[in-house]
Amino acid sequence: MKILVTGFEPFGGEPINPSWEAVRHLPDTISGAEIIKVEIPVVFGRSADVVHEAIVEHVRAARTAGRDWYVFDLAGVLDGLAQRRYADDDQAAQANGWKPYPLPPTFAGLDTRFFKSDPTGRRQGGLFGLDGVHPTTSGYAILAGAILDVLRTAGLNPAPLDYPALARQDTLNASPPALMSVAWDLITPFLTRLVTRRSS
């Protein structure tokens, strides 16, 4: 098995980029899988090309050698967690044959809605951070677990994740801001006006 891992080249005059440093220091093999490391240029339109070229090259080599391929379907995992699109819309869920992605028991109750909390704790969300884009530690743990499932399907035996330990390291969910919901309710009207003005 080959696993392609990417990191960005330095930019803005910096001598290094931490993302590439993390990648290039990975071992060449993990649990019997070969780690392919690719440095991506920070050039508009070129980054995706470099990744695509690397994938094509290694797929061609593997097919020539008669090897099988296993895909980690990130979009499928996120689709199975889609709260507003399917979990809150039975009609859309039925029309699209939606099946919810099974969360580990440790993360039961977390969802993809925008994070809200008050003095009693988290009220909704928890899989994505306060920017609504990047996963929380719990969100990343779920994605990592899905990747390990693919590795097991491929015949590897990776160590299981310690979900409770990862949940304890998720500071947003473990110690949610007491006034997050109040702050969000205060700024929502201003954000709505700003978006409305820009779109008109």
Image: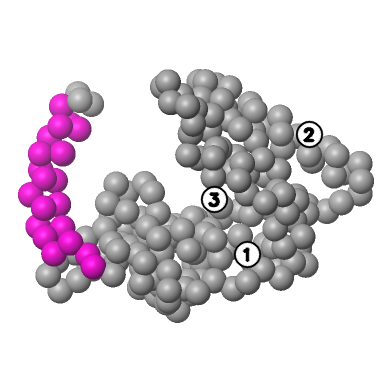
The CA span between labels 1 and 2 is 24 Å
Question: Where is residue 53 drawn, in percent x and y?
Answer: 71, 29
Which residue is farthest bottom? 105
Residue 148, numbered label: 1
Left/right placement of residue 54 relative to residue 98 reads right
Q: In the rendering, at what x and y percent does residue 153 appear? A: 73, 66
Mark 1, other Cα within 10 Å: few <14 / some 14–19 / many ≥20? some
- Please tell me whether residue 80 is drawn above or below residue 132 in the rendered image: below
Q: Quadrant of the N terminus?
A: bottom right
Which residue shows up at 78% across the image and 34% down it?
A: 57
Q: Earlier in the sequence, mark 1 or mark 2?
A: 2
Q: Nearer the viewer, mark 3 or mark 2?
A: 2
Which residue in the protein does label 2 denote?
A: 57
Q: Which amino acid, mark 1?
A: Leu
C-alpha span from label 3 to label 1: 16 Å
The quarter holding residue 172 reads: bottom left
Q: Position of residue 107 (x, y in %)?
A: 41, 72
Whether residue 17 is in magenta: the answer is no
Residue stretch in magenta: 175-197
| Residue at the limit of the structure toward the right, as seen here | 65
Residue drawn at 50 percent across, 40 percent down: 19
Q: Nearer the viewer, residue 33 or 85?
A: 33
Residue 134 relative to residue 101: left or right: left
Q: What's under tag 2, amino acid-wise? A: Glu
Task: Tell me if label 3 and label 1 are in contact, CB under 8 Å.
Answer: no
From the image, tell me which residue sits under label 3: 75
Amino acid type of the residue tagged 3 in the rendering: Ala
Distance from disc 3 to disc 2, alpha carbons, whole Å, reads 23 Å
Which of 9 and 59 lies nearest the eye of the viewer?
9
**The stretch drawn in magenta includes residue 189:** yes
Instruction: Say which element carries label 3.
Output: helix
